[in-house]
């Protein structure tokens, strides 16, 4: 390993561009891959990627910027497993500030990309708390299909999209039933009909191989090209007359049907989960990811057998709805123990803004190990559930979420154990770029920390 | 009793007193007094045992930390709190608290458990009587469903031993709150905290104007909020004057108005104002309105901008009830900052951590931990875990008018005690045992010491560790 790293560094050092190498030394390093933290570890990054991390010692090239993290913790940035980050600056009664839900004529064709605002306050607040990437899903409008979600970063720049149109999001539980006309029966017919309409158009789509060749924008690997370029929209792509979906919506489901785009399915109830597992048998090409799954522990063996990953709420333990009667904080631990690939998301839980709570929740799952009768997870696994596991669920584990060599250099230096809410992010890097941590909130703190009357009103303190 | 029969009862009472007046000559004082406690508490503590916890880290709730501490309780009350030198009384159940922490039970001053219970279906939605912006006549206790499974989660995961259930914030005057012991009951009366005063839920800002403005009804604006509230207080003053006169001089009993009864209770200082209000400027307006009509605001709830006017809150003896880091979900929460709680505390005002949520109520200790960490990092002096525990029990007890009964580990007070399996300011810690008035209501090691609501019996996951 060390030899490999040295070789890489030497090669890199020979390159003409003065790319900066950054080494973070002396801190407790957690890889994000499920392993336990490593005291006095090191992380080396270069050109926006991780070179090496962990229990390593190496000769650093000249000019390496060394950051002493003694007494600190170093981890991959938090990857919010399910969110609506970047879609709403304010959630209620603030026109123009909320793009989470589209009630217009389209559904599956919707693409969150144009709505993501990298300058919105929640992105800055979460960046300042160590959240560096997020899976962003639209909310359903009038249909069970919400549209296509993206993976974004929280960097302080105008280029937030890591992977556009990475997944389609569909509601097949209580909310899906509501959108379909009041019953799960209707939702399932709608779903199958949508796939039927997509399959009609599939024959006009370019073959899968074609989509993988060429030189698409690197950010788009390995999935869906801009759907507006697709030939399935053209007049020559004929459709039956008895269709429910618009052409755009049906065409948007073609990559789902081809297995080129992940399908995130929100269900909570055990029986609904089993229905989704059946869908996978009926349409084997679908790349399904379960979202929610509060009752997953009741059917954990079956989920594990299916190989379908789950992005779950971490600590839901209330029978908040009739589809969550069996909710328990042990759900995640029990699914994990049964062999399910589990990660954590914010499902109906302040998902436009409080993604920073994922690390607190992860800490709670660790704490469950001490409770008789409960099932928690190890510290290393808990961290993985908010870093590498959600990335793996959508096939991006090779890019995001851990400190393995070659991963994007998203990392956080924490004041202490990151699974303690009382710890804070002190330095945040995204793609190797150190990020500003100032927010609307920190500016307000500076303005109002001293209330004594001054020579001018507080409005002049800036 | 219908309004009509109430009126008949009142009239006959007046007639009777009129007859009596014939005999005694001069006009008598009022014969009918309003029953101020028509739904009295029937709470009675369950049997407990003489218990001593030794070798634990103790936060007293009054800013002190005792290492290797000892806590003794019996007959429902705290008997002694001290260090290792404190002797165990004969026959006491002795619990080894080595590596563990003991605190007063957490008090959530802002909960809707029972009136917005789980499951959150329309049939159970009983928190907002959003039929008129002025509804001080409704009482949250009449909406509380004692079988809400959320109570048990707050107890076993959150260490919450006392909570105030408030009506929602759709109305300027939302109705009366009720303070409950977190002890399962068949009726809400069995949960009511004996001797706790009522609260009045008031709201300013976005919610009332949104709810009624959208129906083309007053209030549609913040100025409408204040105008309607002032008009209502003016009416209440007049109502109180009539009753005061009646009580002093007798005569015809004034017409009973349940809404005005509540407001009269506020003007008399018997009912505490719990005022939902986010923005600093609006809190200032509410303070002036309170002074105009001669009542006191006990606490501002969801006071996300309290840090901007912490001095004003201190000078007016008003508590600020806050979240650690909720922000931006609506415009009036846009300026929330993570140092709000410690800044208010540092200004010498009364800071309280609250949930307003059936999930957050299970982790109020962790909310305090975040606020504490943020405060220390911001350089706010004299903060510690022991001090921060005041935000979780002492200060909410004060703002509920029950500090003489609970909220701190003080001999003579109710033994509302939590034994945590680790430092409660850690995400890894949870309650191990919880006592309310000295009765063990939860023991993590004993499945029989875990309440299960009627609703959950026979359901998947009944009795599971939640």
Image (cartoon, coloured by chain):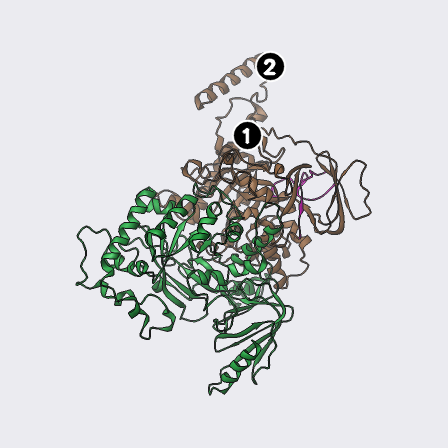
Estimate the spatial distance between the alpha carbons at disc 1 and disc 2, rounded to whole Å. 47 Å
The location of residue B409, given as percent across then percent down, is: 71, 44
Which hue is chain A drawn in? green
Describe residue B69's horizontal placement relative to residue A340 as left or right.
right
Q: Which residues are magenta?
A: B399-422
Q: Position of residue B347 (x, y in %)?
A: 63, 56
- Which chain did the image draw in brown? B
Residue assigned mark 1: B187
Query: Principal SS element in the magenta part?
Result: loop
Which image quarter is the N terminus of chain A in? Answer: bottom right
Q: Specify few, some or many for label 1: CA neighbours under 10 Å numbering under 14, 14-19, or 20 or more.
A: some
Q: Is residue A407 magenta?
A: no
Taking the image as shown, residue A418 lies to the left or right of residue A101, namely right
Residue at (40% x, 71% y) in the render: A158
**Cβ atoms under marks 1 and 2 closer than 8 Å:** no
Q: Is residue A274 visible?
A: yes
Q: Which residue is mark 2?
A: B25
């Amino acid at each position: 390993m060390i030899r490999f790293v040295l070789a890489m560094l030497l090669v890199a050092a020979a390159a003409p561009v003065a790319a900066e190498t950054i080494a973070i030394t002396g801190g407790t390093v957690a890889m994000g891959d499920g392993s336990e933290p490593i005291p006095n570890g090191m992380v080396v990054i270069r050109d926006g990627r991780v070179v090496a991390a962990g229990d390593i010692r190496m000769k650093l090239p000249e000019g390496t910027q060394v950051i002493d993290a003694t007494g600190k913790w170093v981890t991959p940035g938090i990857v919010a497993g399910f969110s609506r980050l970047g879609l709403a600056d304010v959630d209620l009664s603030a026109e123009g500030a909320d793009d989470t839900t589209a009630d217009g004529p389209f559904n599956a064709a919707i693409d969150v990309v144009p709505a993501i605002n990298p300058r919105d306050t929640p992105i800055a607040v979460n960046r300042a708390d160590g959240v560096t990437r997020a899976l962003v899903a639209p909310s359903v409008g009038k249909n069970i299909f919400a549209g296509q979600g993206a993976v974004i970063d929280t960097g302080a720049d105008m280029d937030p999209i890591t992977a556009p149109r990475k997944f389609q999001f569909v509601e097949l539980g209580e909310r899906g039933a509501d959108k379909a006309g009041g019953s799960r029966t209707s939702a399932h017919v709608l779903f199958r009909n949508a796939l039927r309409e997509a399959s009609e158009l599939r024959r006009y789509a370019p073959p899968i191989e074609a989509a993988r060749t060429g030189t698409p924008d690197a950010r788009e690997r390995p999935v869906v090209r801009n759907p507006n370029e697709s030939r399935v929209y053209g007049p020559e792509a004929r459709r039956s007359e008895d269709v429910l979906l618009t052409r755009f919506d049906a065409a948007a489901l073609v990559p789902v049907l081809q297995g080129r785009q992940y399908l995130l399915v929100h269900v909570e109830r055990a029986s609904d989960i089993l229905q989704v597992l059946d869908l996978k048998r009926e349409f084997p090409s679908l790349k399904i990811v379960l979202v929610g799954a509060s009752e997953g522990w009741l059917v954990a063996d079956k989920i594990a057998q299916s190989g379908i990953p789950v992005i779950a709420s971490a600590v839901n333990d209330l029978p908040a709805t009739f589809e969550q009667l069996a909710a328990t904080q042990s759900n995640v631990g029990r699914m994990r123990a049964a062999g399910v690939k589990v990660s954590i998301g914010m499902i109906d839980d302040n998902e436009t803004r409080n993604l920073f709570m994922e690390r607190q929740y992860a800490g709670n799952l660790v704490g469950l190990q001490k409770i008789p009768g409960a099932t928690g997870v190890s510290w290393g696994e808990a961290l993985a559930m908010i870093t590498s596991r959600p990335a793996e669920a959508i096939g991006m584990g090779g890019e995001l979420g851990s400190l393995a060599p070659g991963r994007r250099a998203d990392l956080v230096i924490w004041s202490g154990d990151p699974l303690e809410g009382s710890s804070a992010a002190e330095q945040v890097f995204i793609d190797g770029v150190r990020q500003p941590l100032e927010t609307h909130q920190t500016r307000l703190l500076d303005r109002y920390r001293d209330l004594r009357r001054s020579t001018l009103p507080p409005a002049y303190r800036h | 009793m219908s309004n009509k029969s109430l009126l008949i009862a009142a009239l006959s009472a007046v007639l009777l007193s009129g007859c009596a007046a014939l005999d005694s000559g001069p006009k008598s004082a009022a014969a009918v007094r309003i029953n101020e406690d028509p739904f009295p508490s029937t709470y009675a503590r369950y049997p407990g045992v003489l218990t001593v916890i030794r070798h634990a880290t103790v936060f007293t709730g009054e800013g002190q930390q005792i290492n290797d501490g000892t806590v003794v309780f019996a007959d429902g009350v705290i008997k002694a709190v001290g260090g290792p030198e404190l002797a165990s009384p004969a026959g006491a159940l002795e619990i080894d608290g080595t590596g563990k922490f003991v605190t007063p039970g957490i008090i959530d001053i802002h909960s809707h458990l029972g009136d917005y219970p789980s499951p959150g279906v329309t049939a159970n939605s009983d928190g907002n009587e959003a039929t008129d912006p002025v509804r001080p006549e409704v009482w949250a206790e009449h909406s509380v469903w004692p079988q809400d499974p959320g109570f048990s989660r707050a107890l076993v995961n959150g260490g919450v031993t006392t909570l105030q259930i408030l009506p929602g914030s759709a109305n300027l005057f939302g109705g009366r709150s009720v303070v409950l012991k977190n002890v399962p009951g068949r009726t809400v009366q069995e949960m009511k905290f004996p001797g706790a005063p009522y609260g009045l839920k008031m709201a300013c800002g976005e919610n009332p104007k949104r709810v009624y403005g959208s129906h083309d009804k007053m209030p549609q604006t913040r100025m409408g909020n204040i105008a309607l509230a002032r008009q209502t207080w003016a009416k209440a003053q007049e109502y109180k004057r009539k009753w005061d006169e009646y009580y002093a001089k007798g005569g015809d009993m004034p017409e009973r108005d349940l809404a005005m009864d509540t407001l009269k209770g506020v003007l008399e200082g018997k009912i505490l104002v719990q005022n939902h209000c986010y923005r600093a400027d609006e809190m200032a307006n509410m303070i002036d309105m309170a002074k105009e009509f001669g009542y006191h605001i006990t606490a501002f709830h969801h006071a996300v901008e309290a840090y901007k006017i912490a001095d004003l809150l201190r000078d007016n003896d008003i508590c600020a009830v806050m979240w650690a880091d909720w922000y931006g979900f609506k415009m009036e929460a846009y300026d929330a900052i993570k140092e709000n709680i410690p800044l208010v505390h540092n200004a010498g005002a009364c800071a309280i951590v609250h949930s307003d949520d059936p999930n957050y109520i299970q982790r109020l200790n962790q909310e305090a931990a975040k606020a504490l960490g943020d405060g220390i990092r911001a350089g706010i002096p004299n903060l510690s875990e022991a001090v921060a525990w005041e935000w979780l029990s002492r200060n909410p007890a004060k703002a509920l008018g029950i500090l003489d009964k609970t909220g701190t580990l003080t001999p003579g007070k109710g033994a509302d005690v939590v034994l945590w399996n680790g430092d409660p300011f850690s995400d890894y810690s949870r309650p191990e045992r919880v006592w309310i008035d000295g009765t063990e209501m939860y023991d993590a090691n004993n499945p029989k010491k875990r309440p299960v609501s009627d609703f959950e019996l026979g359901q998947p996951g009944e009795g599971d560790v939640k």
